[in-house]
Amino acid sequence: MRELAADRRSLLHAAAAMFGAALAAPLARALAQDMPAIASGFTASRALFSETQAAQVATVADRIVPPTDTPGAVAAGVPAFIEMMLADWYGDKDRGDFLAGLVALENDCFARFGRGQASATREQLDIVLTAAMNGGVRHLPAGFFEHCRQIVLLGYYSSETGCKQERLYLPVPQRYDGFFPYPGRVYSS
């Protein structure tokens, strides 16, 4: 799988366009840093996630952008994107808050269902994530769910899958055609 090369400035512009003024503060701080461009792909400079954390991130990403008639977040490489963002772009406090949010979600899943996210059903995960969205998960850092949702969506729509399969890729709009048959997906270029 090949990801589209990106730099912080283009990702910041894409995120601002996607989320408007409501960009999660940790994500906005990370994208605003003056850092060198990513040469290729979304690979972290160092391993950050434990095996359990990697599974949790994949599970959450899969529920936020599940596979449908197009590949979902996991197939698009979003967990690797999130690890790269946390390892290379986030400050210590924002990284710690995100990891604490994963712990809070895991603890909530155990409290509700007697099992962790990795062994929970999709329905159980949806209950936990809905509770997180509505502020019903104890010890969850403020704004965690929205932050998590935004970083998953940014990773997905920064991937080749998100750009070329979820959206219909039109590299050069040849001419204006007011009667072009719109297939129901959004175009990107």
Image: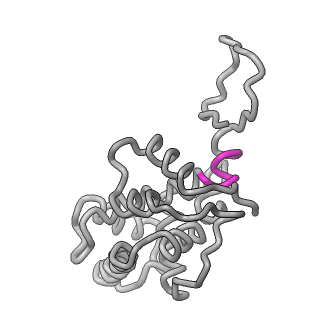
Up the image or down, 69 lies above or below 48; here it is: above
Q: Nearer the viewer, residue 11 or 72?
A: 11
Judge from the rendering whether residue 89 lies leftward or rightward of residue 97; answer left or right.
Answer: right
Q: Nearer the viewer, residue 132 or 69?
A: 132
| Residue 157 x, y percent position in the rendering | 58, 50
Q: Is residue 60 visible?
A: yes
Up the image or down, 97 lies above or below 187; here it is: below
Q: Is residue 109 visible?
A: no
Q: Which residue appears at 65% of the width and 24% of the height?
A: 182
| Residue 139 x, y percent position in the rendering | 23, 77
Up the image or down, 137 lies above or below 103; here it is: above
Secondary structure that dominates the magenta span: helix
| Residue 35 x, y percent position in the rendering | 53, 64
Q: Nearer the viewer, residue 88 or 120?
A: 88
Q: Which residue appears at 54% of the width and 74% of the height?
A: 83
Q: Nearer the viewer, residue 41 or 127?
A: 41
Magenta residue check for 161? yes
- Looking at the rendering, the stretch of residues picked out in magenta corresponds to 158-165
| Residue 97 x, y percent position in the rendering | 33, 75
